[in-house]
Image (cartoon, coloured by chain):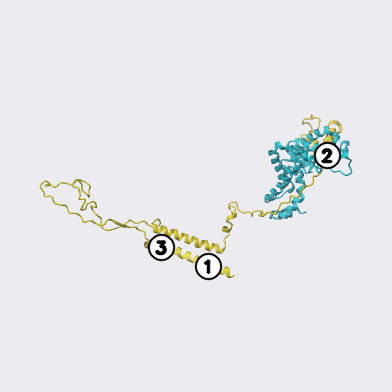
Chain colours: A cyan, B yellow
Amino acid sequence: MDEQALLQASKSGDAGAFNRLVEHYQTSIYNVSLRMVGDAAVAEDITQETFVSAFRALHTFSAGNFRAWLFRIATNACRDHLRSAQVRRNTSLDALVESSSFSFTSEQETPEEYAVRRELSSFIQQSLSTLPTDQRMVLILVDIQALSYEEAARALKTPVGTVKSRLSRAREAMRAALSTQRELLPAQIRSG
Amino acid sequence: MRLFGEGFGDRHCSLETVSSFLDGALREREMQRVESHLASCTDCAQHIEEMRSVVGVLRMMPTVPAPRSFAIPAPARVFVAEPARPWWQPAPIAGLRALTMPSPMTSVRAMAAAAALALAVVFAGDVSGIIGTPEAPVQVGIQDPNPLVGPGNPPGPEQNPILGEPPVPAPDAGNAPVVDAPVAEPTAPEATLPVHSWYRLELWPLELGLLALTAAMAAFSIILRRRTSSS
């Protein structure tokens, strides 16, 4: 995929070219939204809103990291949603955890391993939702979506030093939470 | 960034140091200092291992497939970036696009309409006297020196009808026979004609010019339309 060529075509109004970019990035954007808001339906809405907003504002994107630019739009939309829906924060977390797609995937696992995996998945998502929004965003972008510090800084429009600081605090919070549930950790991690 | 301290005592790695160490984001010299510290500090070594486990778990979090395509529908109106324009040039108004880039036919018709409108305005102003040089009203007829005097309305003796002063008695007013003052002939009331009439147009050269321009533009428009329809 020649991203630059697709971007140029998209800027000229070629929706087909832009949709090829959408296909490439939609899973990442959806996952970030899902981890951020913890609600599959809301994450869908935010993902769609992100791409529509991106297409409309494409002429303002001059150069640089398109993925980081998309993540910025998505995280802003998540932030707006979380700000406006504080009271509904945990409404659909259970439904999200129950979703079979929101679990570790592994072949040839026993029913017991499957149950533990789901429980860990649930616990991680719950722990994520207790983090402050800024720390959660950094943790999701860097540790789950594997963005570099610089990309995360661009996506969140913050200095790299701030990203490092937030990330360390978020990781420490997750360490403190998971230290109480070590039996849920996969064997290779527990032993490592 | 402080390598040590920040809640764990000055002899232990800071949170940010541990996190950056795991990501390999420290400088070479900092990495060496942390590694040498870990060799002698079991607390920090354990802390780093626990943190490494957390990062490992998070990175093992599966990617949830997108539940559907988020492709945007083909827009009815294509969003195209506006061409660069100088800062002093205002943005075009979408509804006025036809006016900003008129065709020759539209231009000729607009000029004919403008000329006709200007002709109407000038003519109306000329006739009504709003436009043009004002003149003193032209009076027709003789000024009646004593309009109040008439057969049924003789002048009173106590006031001079012209000067408005009491009449000066003659030296022999008491003995002089009463002679009736000559009664002025009744005259027609004062008649004033308006200065500007349709037959007294002062701006006739301008009006004639505008009339000619309107006719020319209308004729040109007709010719253009015939040529367009024939081609």
What residue would you read off at disc 2? A118
Name the disc covering residue B222, or none.
Answer: 1
Given this view, does label 3 or label 1 mark the residue nearer the observer?
Answer: 1
The secondary element bearing badge 3 is classed as helix
- Residue B199 is left or right of residue B150, and the answer is right
Name the disc covering residue B29, or none.
Answer: none
* Residue A109 percent across, percent down from the top left: 88, 42
What residue would you read off at disc 3? B204
Q: What amino acid type is highlighted by mark number 1?
A: Ile
Give the letter of the chain under mark 3: B
Residue with the most extreme left position: B175
Looking at the rendering, in which quadrant would you find the C terminus of chain A? top right
Question: Is A93 in front, or is B35?
Answer: A93
The secondary element bearing badge 2 is classed as helix
Whether residue A137 is situated above or below residue B196 in the rendered picture: above
Residue A161 visible somewhere in the drawing: no
Splitting the image into 4 quarters, where does residue A120 fall? top right
Question: Is B194 in front, or is A68?
Answer: B194
- Please report the residue visible at 52 percent of the width from the left and 63 percent of the height from the top: B109
Question: Is B84 in front, or is B227?
Answer: B227
Give the letter of the chain under mark 2: A
